[in-house]
Image (cartoon, rainbow, N blue to C red):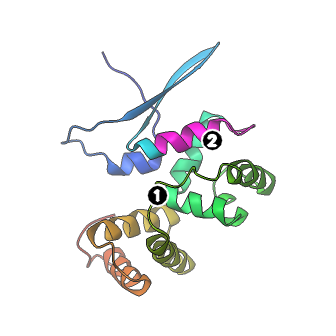
Amino acid sequence: VGYVLTIPFSTSQKLSVSEEVFIHVHTYHREDQLKLFGFFTESEKKIFEILLKVNGIGPSMAISILSGLDIDRFADAINNSNTEILTKIPGIGKAKAEKIIFELSRKKNIFKDHISPEIKTEKNDAIEALISLGYDEKNVSNTVSKLLEANSSSSTEELIKKALAVFSGHGGFKS
């Protein structure tokens, strides 16, 4: 038996053809449709399910949000009421971004399981700097996350230097 799962970009980046993986599945059932959505982490699945509770956000938009931003950047946008980050996602205008922020900011503990504020600040500062240099946000976010996995005590400057090395082909992995 095979199943088709719709997955966000962040999940597809973590999958390998040669490895067996565990995917967290959300079953979306309405009277006229049955769809399966897969996530690499339980956190992604929880955020997806929370987004579905926001009026006007369906499963496709929730997948777009998770594909356009990693969870930490999304949490930062919500916590800091940063509509600019959300409006970079296709299909989200200023009004929808404000609505998402308004509805999710009332749920105080939805992002409590994410990385510490110190790491989040270093990570977000590095991501913002690299994006301002013209690098693609998805690629930058993925690369900086991998760098932090390798060394969680990296400073913003170290993250930027290492990411630039990766982008120029002199880093330790491909993003």
Q: Is residue 70 visible?
A: no
Instruction: Report the residue at 81% width, 53% height from top.
Output: 95
The magenta region covers: 44-57
Is residue 48 visible in the rendered structure shown here? yes
Measured Cα–Cα span from mark 2 to mark 1: 17 Å
Amino acid, disc 2: Leu
Left or right: 110 as drawn, with respect to 95: left
Residue at x-position 58% and y-position 51%: 109
Q: Which residue is mark 1?
A: 114
Q: Nearer the viewer, mark 2 or mark 1?
A: 1
Residue 30 place in picture, x, y as percent = 63, 17
Secondary structure beneath label 1: loop
Q: Are marks 2 and 1 in contact (CB under 8 Å)?
A: no
Residue 66 to residue 56: above or below:
below
Q: Residue 33: x, y in percent?
A: 59, 17
The x and y percentages for residue 172 are 23, 72
Question: Where on the picture, by quarter, is residue 101?
Answer: bottom right
Q: Circle 2 is placed at which residue position? A: 51
Name the residue furthest top: 31
Residue 2 position, x and y percent, is 33, 20
Residue at 28% x, 73% y: name it.
151
Residue type indicated by callout 1: His
Instruction: Point out which mark residue 139 bears.
Output: none
